[in-house]
Amino acid sequence: MLIVTGKEIQVLVRERGALAVLFLLPLLVGSLYGTMQTQMARDSEANPIFLTVALANLDAGTFGVELSKALHGISILEVVEPETPEEAEAIVAEGRATAAIVIPADFTAQVDAYEPTQITVILDPADPQRAEIVNGIMKAAVSEVTIWGEVQYGVRTVLRDSGLLDDADPEAQRAAAAQSLGVIMTRINELRSDPPIRVSSEDLQGATVEGGITVFLAHMFPGITVMFVFFVVGVAGESLLHEREVGTLRRLLASPIPKAAVIAGKVLAFTLLVCLQVVVLFGTANIAFRMPLGRAPLALILLTVILGLVASALGMLVASFSKSAKQADSAGMILSFVLAGLGGAIAISQFPLARSGGPMATVAQLTPHAHAIEAYYRLMAEKGTLVDILPQLAVLLGMALLFGAIAARRFRFE
Amino acid sequence: MPAILEVDNLVKKFGEFEAVKGVSFQVEEGEVFGLLGPNGAGKTTTISMLTGILAPTAGTARIGGYDVRTQMAQAKTLNGLVPQDLALYPTLSARANLEFFGRVYGLKGRDLKERVADVLRVVSLTERADQAIETFSGGMKRRVNIAAGLVHQPRLLFLDEPTVGVDPQSRNHIFESVLRLNRERGMSIIYTSHYMEEVELLCSRAAIIDEGRIIALDTIKNLIAMLGGGVIHVGVERADPTTRDAIAALPMVKEAVLLAPSVAAPPAPGAEADLHERAPLATGSVIKIVTEHSQQAVVSVIGYLNTHDIMLTSLEILEPNLESVFLHLTGKKLRD
Ligand SMILES: Nc1ncnc2c1ncn2[C@@H]1O[C@H](COP(=O)(O)OP(=O)(O)OP(=O)(O)O)[C@@H](O)[C@H]1O
Ligand SMILES: [Mg+2]
């Protein structure tokens, strides 16, 4: 089987036309969209989402300092630090800042003691939209700090309850707690580099910016990719029938390798081709447009492999219904366009079409495209893991097996 | 000598149509055996059943003792197939093609390299080995096509019309290779063709196959001897059993037969009779005359027709070759 795969790859490498369609065309289309998108993002930066906040930090303790740092670290925030809460309020009143944030003097102490505490956020009523953004940021930032407080509290409780340090002097107890805390803090700081802070807002063009992920990158680019992946259907179907027409299939049938290996070898080759296609397209999008790839690389790979299987198996199915290689090629082409349309691969929308509800969504569910796009969306935009895409994987694998089984039954080797 | 191939009443039906109607023959180890027949005779279909491409509808065959119905896997390792079509990957080089077909038979590593180098030598294409097949001439492609069936050193090689569309030079080259494979390596070969002269030249024995049946099977010498001193076809204006019997009684004539009107196709309206190719079929009445000596018989036949005022419309003296044998047996030409 691998022998057939190897040969198939040798043949494919020389198929300039097919490779152009499978790789260059999607790159071109993708880049076009990507550039448009980047342009849009730049435009929205020019009409700045920049927000100015006035921060009055009355707390010299660890948490006050950390929170202040966290706010400074958010790129869209311009932080000014007046001395007093009153000054901060005045700045907002004068419209020089969207919001004022007051961290109370006992903030660290309260968090440490695991007592409720309050950060005051004074919003500019004249600009509710932006004010809402600041509110969102604050909630996220504070939750980070409170988690930390919780952890510290937790560490101390554990140490006390375990009785481990009962005999130790208070000095040693603090040292041990500090050490455990050090580990946890490192972890939290790591989290900051992939911040759990999300900013949601609608910009003027209506494109949603969600933690820096754009509609295009989270949904449309994988959509385009899936569409072009299915162009492999025509290529694969044509390749199988071409072998029958040229007669190489007869040679293979006369050789000791089983029929199934001939087909399986081909399917594997085209699956690898799809994987390469996805790697190239996603890689380019990742580097050029900073498309997120999610946090489950293995799930991403598995999904791509299964997607490749579905597309290749569909190619074999098309071959089994076609009379000639030419026919398989055009049938595959038409099919891949129709399925892409129905499956929402080219829909300009924020979410996968299949999520929209209604009859179109139901139809979309019948295509492998919709399931693949949904799965990529879950992995890349929603940072899901393997578990989140199991239903899609199951459906796609089922389709691959179904297509393969029908093709195997129908295909005439002679 | 043991038989490498024993074919036993093979039948293949495609739906209602019976392409092969019970074919039996044997091929000895080390023999070059010809399967001769016109287009659509069932040659390729027979080979397909013997190489595991098609399952026989009925009957069976044994290759090196392995039954093709139950032990095809073993039989396949003994078989080599050179299909009628150019069954190669045109964009790959000759070497890549040969290596692939070698791998398919389980060859690998140095073994594979050596075998490929060897078959490239056999077909004299070592120099062009690394160029893509699509840049080759028709004859060179044919040679690679043959080489691809040889990489795994089969004991029984099926050559299905290996010279179709080939220039004379490549053709001669192919003949030489076939003979060398047979003589130097003892390869048994089944050679399919509708070119009589090829089969005469290469094969020791041949089966003549027509419409799915073997109509003659013998050594080439014996097949040609069927024609006796030669056969002549005489086209006449009118012919009746009396004329036929009179001609049969002439000296040097062994036998005279009135060919059926269906065999003697009516001439196309306005078509000029071409004495060599078309004449025997161009008129309503053709008498086939088996002679003891064709030249002398022609003289007496013409003499008879003259004296009886029967107009001669065509005359063909069939060379003592397989082409004539086929015409003799079926009343049809092998090729149009
Ligand atoms: N797969 C098939 N389905 C239906 N009929 C077929 C099939 N293969 C061959 N035939 C028919 O069987 C008959 C024998 O065909 P075959 O190819 O064996 O002839 P052949 O002797 O090899 O002729 P040629 O010299 O043209 O190659 C033909 O009438 C052909 O149309
Ligand atoms: Mg044939």
Image: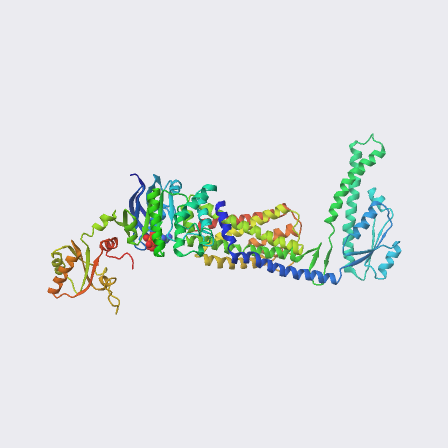
Expressed as whole percent of the image width and height from the top left, the position of residue A95 reads 83, 62
* Residue extending furthest toward the bottom: B270
- The percent coordinates of residue A265 (x first, y second) are 49, 47
Q: Is residue A158 left or right of residue B55?
A: right
Q: Residue furthest front?
A: B127
State whether residue B112 appears in this view.
yes
Residue B217 is at least partly visible in this image: no
Q: How many marks?
A: 0
Instruction: Decide which of B297, A174 is in the foreground and name it.
Output: B297
Left or right, residue A218 beside residue B74: right
Residue A185 appears left or right of A30: right
| The quadrant where residue A167 appears | top right
Q: Position of residue B5 (x, y in %)?
A: 32, 42
Considering only vertical position in the picture, is A131 above or below B220? Answer: below
Image quadrant where one finds the C terminus of chain B? bottom left
The residue lying at 73 percent from left, 58 percent from top is A201
Q: Residue at x 85, y 62 (%)?
A: A94
- Classify residue B282 by image quadrant: bottom left
Residue farthest along the top direction in this orientation: A167
Residue A308's x, y, as percent? 55, 50
